[in-house]
C-alpha cells in the first residue's frame, strides 16, 4: 500500500473513531494493556534483537549513545508503559466536553465543544514504549495515527503494534486503520507532504530530526528541538535541597530531554556545590564554548551569576523553553522567576525530571512541546483535542437581527 492510501485510510478511520463512546474506547485500552502484559516476553525478545543491531549503529556513528540508552525496554519501562495505559482508562474522556454554552437569543444556543484533531503523524527515534503511549492516547482522544519509528527499534515497534492491532480486531465496533505504521525514509517524505489528510505532525527525537521536520512540511508541528534545561541556585537556597535536586536532574537519566544541562549559582551562595557535584560523578564545565547545548550525558555546564535578573536573562537567552527551575527559600524570588522565565515548565525546588506526562498524571504523553500555541509542555489527552462550535436554533436567520426585528442578548448558561 502506498503512503497516500495509508493516509486516506487513516482519515476515514479518524471520522469513524470520532463518534465512538467512552466505554468502547476504555474497553479497547484495557484489553490492550492486558495483551501487552501477557506478551511481554515476546516484546523483550524483539527489543534484544534491536539492541544487538543498535550496538553496530553506535560503533559506526549512525546513532548516538544517548539514543541507544533510550532504546532499551526493561521491566521498569514495561511496568510504566502498562500503568500508563491503565491510567488513561481512568481519565475523563477529553472529547465532547462543553467548553462554552452561550444563549445568543431565545432558542438560539452556541456550544463550544472539544473534538479530536483528526489524523496524527508521529515520527520518533528509539524509545519503543512510545508506540503504546501514543496509541493509547490517540484511542482515548479519538484520533487516528500513522507511526514512523526509527530503524534502530523496528523489531520492538512491529511487535508492540502488532499485538495492539490484533487486540483491537477483537473489540466489536472498534474502527479499522486507527493505528497504522510505516517504516521507510520515503514514507517520512510522503508524510510531510500529506497535508490533505494529516492534521498534526509530532516528532519525538533529537534536534536534527525536529528541525528537519519543521523545515520540510506545511502541516502544523508540535514538539521541541532541544532540551536545554537550567537550574538556578539562589542566594537563600537550602544546600541539601540544591544538592539533591541537581544530582537527580543530572544523573537520574542523563539522556532525557528534561535532564538539567546548565547550572547557574548566585555569587553569594556560600556552599561549595561544584565539589559536591563532582563527587556525585558529574563532569562540570565552566563557561563552555556555547551555552545553547544539550549534552545528553553527565556533563553539566555551570557559571556564577550576580543576581536573579542575570539568571533569568541567561535562561531566556540560551534556554530552549523546555523546563527550568529555581532553588530558593525566598517566595518573592521564586514567583518572579516562574513568571519571567519563558518556558513550558517553571519549577521551584524540584527536579526538572518531573517534566513528563506520566508524572503529571496524564497517563502518558505524545511528547513535550515548547510551542506557544495550542499545547505546551508534556502533551497528553487535552493537547490532542481541538474544538468546534455547534449552533442550535429554530429557523433563526441573520436578516432579523440586521433589520432590528430581533436582538442578541448573549447570556452564558
Image: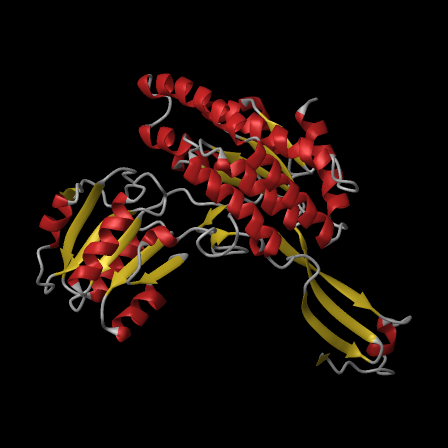
Measuring from the top left, give residue 410's x and y in whole percent: 73, 80
Left or right relative to 110: residue 81: left
Q: Eyeballing the image, is 236 above or below 65?
A: below
Left or right relative to 349: residue 11: right
At a point 85% along the width and 77% down the height, the residue shown is: 107
Looking at this view, name the residue that lies furthest to the right: 395
Measuring from the top left, give residue 221's x and y in whole percent: 53, 44
Q: Nearer the viewer, residue 318 or 82?
A: 82
Q: Quadrant of residue 167?
A: top right
Q: Quadrant of residue 219?
A: top right
Q: Quadrant of residue 268?
A: bottom left
Q: Eyeballing the image, is 263 above or below 176?
A: below
Q: Nearer the viewer, residue 344 or 289?
A: 344
At a point 57% along the width and 49% down the height, the residue shown is: 86
Left or right relative to 283: residue 380: right
Q: Which color scheme did the rendering employ for the protein?
A: secondary structure
Measuring from the top left, give residue 245's x and y in whole percent: 25, 55
At a point 87% along the width and 77% down the height, the residue shown is: 400
Residue 211 visible to the viewer = no
Q: Nearer the viewer, residue 38 or 3?
A: 38
| Quarter of the rendering occupied by the C terminus | bottom right
Measuring from the top left, give residue 402's x and y in whole percent: 82, 77
At a point 23% along the width and 73% down the height, the residue shown is: 330
| Quarter of the rendering occupied by the N terminus | top right
Residue 62 visible to the viewer = yes
Amino acid at each position: 500500500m502506498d503512503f497516500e492510501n495509508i493516509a486516506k485510510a487513516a482519515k476515514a478511520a479518524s471520522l469513524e473513531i470520532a463518534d465512538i463512546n467512552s466505554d468502547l474506547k476504555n474497553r479497547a485500552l484495557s484489553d490492550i494493556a492486558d495483551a501487552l502484559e501477557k506478551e511481554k516476553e515476546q516484546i523483550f525478545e524483539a527489543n534484544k534483537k534491536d539492541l544487538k543491531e543498535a550496538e553496530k549503529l553506535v560503533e559506526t556513528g549512525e546513532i548516538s549513545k544517548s539514543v541507544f540508552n533510550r532504546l532499551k525496554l526493561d521491566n521498569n519501562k514495561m511496568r510504566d508503559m502498562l500503568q500508563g495505559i491503565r491510567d488513561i482508562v481512568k481519565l475523563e474522556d477529553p472529547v465532547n466536553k462543553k467548553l462554552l454554552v452561550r444563549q445568543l437569543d431565545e432558542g438560539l444556543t452556541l456550544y463550544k465543544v472539544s473534538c479530536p484533531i483528526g489524523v496524527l503523524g508521529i515520527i520518533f527515534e528509539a524509545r519503543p514504549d512510545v508506540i503504546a503511549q501514543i496509541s493509547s492516547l490517540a484511542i482515548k482522544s479519538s484520533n487516528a495515527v500513522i507511526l514512523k519509528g526509527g530503524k534502530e527499534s523496528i523489531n520492538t515497534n512491529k511487535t508492540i503494534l502488532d499485538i495492539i492491532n490484533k487486540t483491537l480486531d477483537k473489540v466489536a465496533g472498534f474502527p479499522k486503520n486507527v493505528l497504522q505504521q510505516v517504516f521507510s525514509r520515503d514514507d517520512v517524505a510522503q508524510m510531510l507532504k500529506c497535508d490533505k489528510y494529516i492534521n498534526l505532525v509530532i516528532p519525538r527525537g533529537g534536534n536534527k530530526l525536529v528541525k528537519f521536520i519543521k523545515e520540510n512540511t506545511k502541516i502544523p508541528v508540535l514538539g521541541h528541538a532541544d532540551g536545554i534545561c537550567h537550574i538556578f541556585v539562589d542566594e537563600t537556597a537550602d544546600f541539601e535541597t540544591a544538592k539533591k535536586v541537581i544530582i537527580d536532574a543530572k544523573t537520574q537519566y542523563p539522556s532525557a530531554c528534561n535532564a538539567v544541562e546548565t547550572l547557574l549559582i548566585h555569587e553569594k551562595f556560600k556552599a561549595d556545590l561544584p565539589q559536591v557535584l563532582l563527587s556525585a560523578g558529574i563532569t562540570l564545565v565552566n563557561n563552555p564554548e556555547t551555552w545553547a547545548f544539550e549534552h545528553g550525558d553527565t556533563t553539566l555546564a555551570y557559571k556564577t551569576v550576580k543576581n536573579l535578573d542575570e539568571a533569568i536573562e541567561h535562561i531566556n537567552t540560551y534556554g530552549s523553553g523546555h523546563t527550568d527551575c529555581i532553588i530558593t527559600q525566598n517566595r518573592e524570588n521564586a514567583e518572579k522567576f516562574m513568571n519571567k522565565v519563558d518556558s513550558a515548565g517553571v519549577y521551584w525546588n524540584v527536579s526538572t525530571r518531573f517534566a513528563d506526562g506520566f508524572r503529571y498524571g496524564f497517563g502518558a504523553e505524545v511528547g513535550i512541546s515548547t510551542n506557544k500555541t495550542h499545547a505546551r509542555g508534556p502533551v497528553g489527552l487535552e493537547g490532542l483535542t481541538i474544538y468546534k462550535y455547534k449552533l442550535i436554533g429554530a429557523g433563526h436567520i441573520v436578516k432579523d437581527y440586521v433589520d432590528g426585528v430581533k436582538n442578541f442578548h448573549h447570556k452564558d448558561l
